[in-house]
Image (spheres, rainbow, N blue to C red):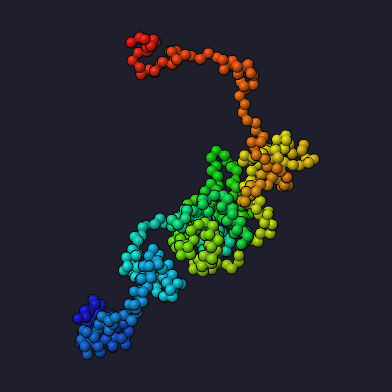
Amino acid sequence: MITMSTREEGRIGVLEQVLLGKLSQSQAARLLEVSVRQMRRLQRRYEAQGGAGLVHKLRGQVSNRQLDVDLALHAQQLITAHYPDFGPTLASEMLVQHHNIVLSVESVRTLMVRAGLWRAKRKRQKSIHPMRERRASRGELIQIDGSPHDWFEGRGPRCTLLVFIDDATSEVMALHFTPTETTAAYMQTLRDYILLHGLPACLYSDRHSIFCTSKGADDNPLPTQFARALNRLGIEGIQASSPQAKGRVERANQTLQDRLTKALRLAGINDIAAANAWVGGYIEQHNKRFAVAACHPHDAHVQYLETRSQLDLILAHHFERLLSKTLSCQFRGQVLQISAPGQQRRLVGQTVQIMEQLDGRLVVCYKEKMLDYQACDRARYVKPPVDSKALNPRVQTALNERPRPTKAHPWKRWVGPASSAWNPSPTQP
């Protein structure tokens, strides 16, 4: 038995009014919100079949869009075997890419729910933040952030992924795995970025101590090493006041933590070095899937025209040291002896810059001119401590011949304040 819907039952009353001549077909069509032609069809069906003629003909029939049972079972088995912890969207993409099975995301979601692999998540109420329009051109604003995560899912050590993403296109510009989020790691990633894309107009980061210093009582604090390098390269650095302000890179981190970890698993990658060598191909696939077109086709990147050696000096850690009268200074447990014939008097007491490059090499400069130097172990220049009493043999002899208390001396027999009474004589009870 086919039941009628409330809407179909309501049509019966209107059609009865038409049959009794109380309503015209055009009036009835307006009441039922159908065309006059459809009204005539409904009236003919009602006159011939009664209320059953008003029921939709496809009700109770198998849908023409029903998924093939064998195909659905095969897809469900593949998902259970290979992609049990994937999301429906990513699982559907993997079925197309690796198994040539085309299913919609909702069909895959239904199969995963049926297999107990997916459960709908409760949406929590999110804070409302004002929208910010994307920058108009590619390279105008690059959002950067570090994402610590178990990227190798226990197959390797936990590490941090440095992410550079374009604000205008959501295009991932650079990915770099590193043990921890450090200044050297960001400088290495920025170096690779500049050599590949050029100089961006602006970098947008959080307020990590790598990017900015806490002012405190000092109104003009010294810039950080990374901020100094950006200033030298002509790149503006902006620090966000909240995670929501740089939401584009935060959402990219969530996507990468879901998709990239599974891609690393499928590729059999278990360490940082192999991941950094492999990640370039993943960036291309990711951008094909998620990148959008910029409002303006103009690329805001500026080509870097100086040499790579100059770039390495800029993206190095810079320190200042004061030269002694012997034209030497100390740095990281070493003594750097400057070799500058004919310039000894001019360099004594002057401040030099020591640049520690990313590969560990040191460069010493004075007024942007490199100085030759030799690095020696500091232990060669520091004399071992000497006991001053050992300088005089008579003092040493007197110390060796000094009288020492006997075993019966009260100092030897004292047992502390916990004793009930002090016994000065060994024969006294």
| Nearest to the observer: residue 23 or residue 223 | 223
| Nearest to the observer: residue 151 or residue 387 | 387
Classify the position of the C terminus by image quarter. top left
Q: Is residue 350 left or right of residue 214?
A: right
Q: Is residue 92 above or below residue 383?
A: below
Q: Residue 313: x, y in percent?
A: 66, 51
Q: Residue at x 56, y 49 (%)?
A: 183
| Nearest to the observer: residue 28 or residue 364 | 364
Q: Residue 393: x, y in percent?
A: 64, 18
Q: Is residue 126 above or below residue 83?
A: above
Q: Is residue 92 above or below residue 313?
A: below
Q: Residue at x 52, y 60 (%)?
A: 275
Q: Is residue 201 visible?
A: no
Q: Residue 411: x, y in percent?
A: 44, 15
Q: Is residue 299 visible?
A: yes
Report the number of discs.
0
Classify the position of the N terminus by image quarter. bottom left
Q: Quadrant of residue 353?
A: top right
Q: Is residue 191 left or right of residue 80?
A: right
Q: Residue 193: x, y in percent?
A: 59, 59
Q: Is residue 316 left or right of residue 92?
A: right
Q: Residue at x 33, y 63 (%)?
A: 119
Q: Residue at x 32, y 77 (%)?
A: 69
